[in-house]
Image: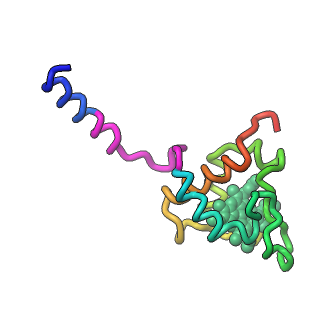
Amino acid sequence: MKPRTFGVLTVVLIALLGAPMPAMPQQGALKEGKVLYERHCAGCHGIAGDGLGPDIKDLIVPPANFRSPTSRIKTDMELYLAIKHGVLFSPMHAWADRLSDQEIWDVLSYIRMLAPFDAVG
Ligand code: HEC
C-alpha cells in the first residue's frame, strides 16, 4: 500500500471510530465488566449470575436470575436500560449516576458471558 493511501485510510478510520454512538449496542470490555460486576452486582445477582447473592435475604423482590430463560430472551438493549434506569418498584435502582455508558456495556458484556442471549428462551 502506498504511504499516501495508508494515510487516507487512517484518517477515515479515525473519523469512523470517533463518531458519536449514543446508546448503541456495543461490545464491552469483559475484564472491566467482571470487576464492576463483582463489586456492585454480585451481592444481589450472585457471582454466577443466578440471582442468589449473599445480600438477598432482606429483599422483597428477588434479583433477576440472568441464567433463566426469562432473562436470556431479553435483548442487550432491554438489559442495558434496566441497568441504566433501574427497575420500577424493585431494589434494582438506576446506575446511570454511578456507571458511565461504557461501564454499563462492560458489565452487561460480562453478564452475557455468564448467560448468553437466547432468542428461543
Ligand atoms: C440490591 C440488590 C441489587 C443490586 C445491587 C443489583 N441488582 Fe439488578 N436487579 C435486582 C432486582 C431485585 C431486579 C429486578 C427483578 C424483577 O424485575 O423482578 C434486578 C434486575 C436487573 C436486571 C434486569 C434483568 C431482567 O431479566 O429483566 C438487570 C440487567 C440487572 N438487574 C443488572 C444489574 C447490574 C449490572 C447490577 C450492578 C451494577 C445490579 N443489577 C445490581 C437487584 C439488584
Number of marks present in the image shown: 0
Q: Give the image quarter of residue 93.
A: bottom right
Q: Is residue 56 above or below residue 7?
A: below
Magenta stretch contains residue 8? no
In magenta, the rendered stretch is 13-28
Query: x, y (%) of residue 111?
Result: 67, 53
Residue 121 visible from this viewpoint? yes
Query: x, y (%) of residue 114?
Result: 71, 50
In terms of secondary structure, what is the magenta stretch mainly? loop
Horizontal relation, residue 118 to residue 62: left or right: left
Q: Give the image quarter of residue 51.
A: bottom right
Residue 86 visible from this viewpoint? no
Which is more toward the observer, 43 or 63? 43
Query: x, y (%) of residue 42?
Result: 71, 66
Residue occupying image coordinates x 76% and y 53%: 66
Which is more toward the observer, 6 or 77? 6
Residue occupying image coordinates x 62% and y 47%: 77
Horizontal relation, residue 84 to residue 63: left or right: left
Furthest-bottom residue in view?
A: 58
Query: x, y (%) of residue 109?
Result: 60, 49
Residue occupying image coordinates x 79% and y 76%: 55
Which is more toward the observer, 15 or 67? 67
Q: Assign ligand 1 to one image quadrant.
A: bottom right
